[in-house]
Amino acid sequence: MTLQTAFRTVQNPQDTLWDVVVVGGGMVGAALALGLGKQGFEVLLLEQQAPQVEWRPDSPYQTRVSALTRASENILRNLGAWQGITARRYHPFVAMHVWDEVTAGEVHFSAQEMDEPNLGYTVENEIIQAALWEQLATCSKVRVLFGAKLKNLALETEQAGLVLEDIGTIQARLIVGADGAHSQVRQLASIGLDTHDYEQCAVVGCVKTELPHQDTCWQRYRKEGPFAYLAMNDNISSIAWYLPLEKMQWALSLSDEAFARELGEASDWKLGRVIEVAERAAFPLVRRHAEHYVKSGLALVGDAAHTIHPQAGQGVNLGLLDVAALIDVLVDARQQGKPIGRLSVLRRYERWRRGDNAVVQRSMEGFDWLFKQDASLKTVFRRGFLPLANRLAPIKNWLMSQALNGRDALPLLAKRSVED
């Protein structure tokens, strides 16, 4: 079952001047379309096909999982999508344990120490997307166009235009690219990209372990790269196994039995043996950052604007913060009678989010550099730093507060839920 029939079909989208056209209906694009629709903007969402929303308790675990922060939880609650997540499958984790392969250093983060109910939630990406699309189906201000192929952009006039194959030009006050890391919108807008190849890959999937995960996310820094267990239901954990890029096909080609043994070795048997292996996937790791997030009549959000090393699970969280910040900027512009596609308006969004995203990108690269086992001085530093950080509660609590709640300048949607 899909939600495709639940939306009012758009027979002639070129006959309407849309407030916003969002290209891409993944987690970030769907959240943006929904949030703008709830604010009364006339939104057209372009997506190839509606996601599957039918779910059963015995549905197999998906390969891609996100660790949602408190800020992301608030955004999803305020959009009305959180209930759809909790009705399916999610798991709160209450602790994080980080340790180093070479030194004896380790750090343990606890929700109890921070007086928090948890440190976040692990949720399958498809469940987040499905919950958002359920809400989109109830939002009268959002229309969806399925299967349209983007051919070109026209940004030289006061109104932005998208040229679609077999349809023609659609006019909008603002076009938003939410179409992923290889964004066609970004390419057609001739926005450059700063990239860095980590020469690593991430192997992901869900497994069942012999020992319980204790509602804890476990991360071990190894010579080849980090290995993490993200706690999910029962003894199920999502894995994030980082390897040199040349080992990606090797990891995918292993039998389930051999794969399980390798995971046990990589985790130092922290959760005992891996006794069940679900579907696995792998992808190369590349840091990308758009040289600009905006042009006149155009904005980029989520992976279309930035991708990040996933070791701290911040990718979707940064994208949802982009969404909330852009909604704030557009609502303020409308209240002040300013055109929402004006470059000076959109630059406020860019200033708000681009620097923050860059800080998080570089911070993740800093961790990756620090824990690479390639220099004795770094080993000496880790041997002293990790035990010290573990003993100093103010440092630990500050680090976790930044990860859980984000930085100080939070958009309205990311603050305490309207349900509270």
Image (cartoon, rainbow, N blue to C red):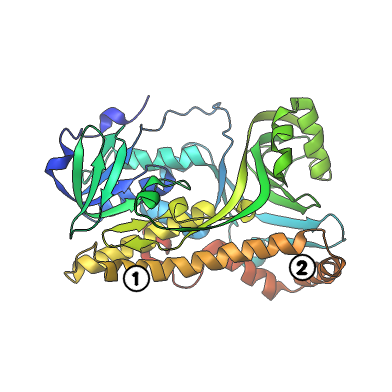
Measuring from the top left, give residue 219's x and y in whole percent: 73, 52
Residue type indicated by callout 2: Asn
User: Closest to the observer: 381 or 150?
Assistant: 150
Point out the frontmost of discs 1 and 2: 1
Quarter of the picture containing the N terminus is: top left
Alpha carbon of mark 1 to alpha carbon of mark 2: how far?
Answer: 38 Å
- The vertical placement of 229 against 414, above or below, is above
Residue that label 2 marks: 390
Characterize the local packing of mark 1: few (<14), some (14-19) or many (20 or more) Cα atoms within 10 angstroms: some
In this figure, what is the number of numbered marks?
A: 2
| Residue 244 appears left or right of 50 | right
Q: Residue at x 73, y 34 (%)?
A: 251
Measuring from the top left, give residue 133's x and y in whole percent: 36, 39
Q: In which quarter of the image is residue 160?
A: bottom left
Characterize the local packing of mark 2: few (<14), some (14-19) or many (20 or more) Cα atoms within 10 angstroms: some
Instruction: Classify mark 1: helix, strand or loop.
Output: helix
- Answer yes or no: is residue 115 visible: no
Residue that label 1 marks: 348
Measuring from the top left, give residue 329's x and y in whole percent: 31, 66
Residue 141's tag is: none
Q: Residue at x 42, y 44 (%)?
A: 83
Q: Which residue is drawn at 56% across and 40% down?
A: 64
